[in-house]
Amino acid sequence: MSLEFQKMLDAQVLKFSHHAEVRMQQRGIKLQPESLTKIMNAVEEAASKGAQDSLVVFRDIAMIVNVPSRTVVTAMDGGQMKSNIFTQIDSAIILS
């Protein structure tokens, strides 16, 4: 398999950092496959517009995603979102 083909495959997958996995487990956040598809499509669109670090809000879940690596850095539910300030992002994606 060529390196270019592998890069294309990797770009189609949303990855989760260890920190994000732990946070999601602690906070009881679960994403269904169709939800992941919506989020991945939105991240792809953000990438096409040059985004680097995006806040993705999907229903009652907020995630910070490093767009070039397609990696969720952290995640929180609605309760944690209310009193949070999001820094070091250059874009926001609000999904329904």
Image (cartoon, rainbow, N blue to C red):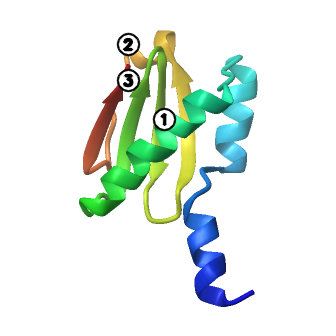
The quadrant holding residue 37 is: top right
**Of discs 2 and 1, which sits in the foreground?**
1
**Residue 72 in the image, given as x and y percentages of width and height:** 56, 46
Residue placed under numbered mark 1 in the picture: 38
Q: Which mark is residue 28?
A: none
Which badge, 1 or 3, comes first in the chain's sequence? 1
Q: Which mark is residue 84?
A: 3
With 40 as the anchor, is 90 left or right in this view?
A: left
Which residue is found at the position 41% from the left and 54% from the top?
44
With 43 as the anchor, is 85 left or right in this view?
A: left
Q: Which mark is residue 82?
A: 2
Q: Secondary structure at mark 1?
A: helix
Q: Is residue 90 above or below residue 59?
A: below
**Residue 36 in the image, given as x and y percentages of width and height:** 58, 36
Which badge, 2 or 1, comes first in the chain's sequence? 1
Instruction: Work out which quarter of the rendered image holds the N terminus and state it.
Output: bottom right
Q: Around disc 2, counting alpha carbons within 10 Å, would you say few (fewer than 14), some (14 to 19), or many (20 or more)?
A: few
Which residue is found at the position 72% from the left and 38% from the top?
21
Residues under numbered marks 1 and 3 in contact, where contact means CB atoms less than 8 Å apart: no
Which residue is found at the position 35% from the left and 59% from the top?
47
Which amino acid, mark 3? Asn
The quadrant holding residue 50 is: bottom left
Instruction: Look at the image and tell me whether residue 85 can be seen.
Output: no
Residues under numbered marks 3 and 2 in contact, where contact means CB atoms less than 8 Å apart: yes
Which amino acid, mark 1? Lys
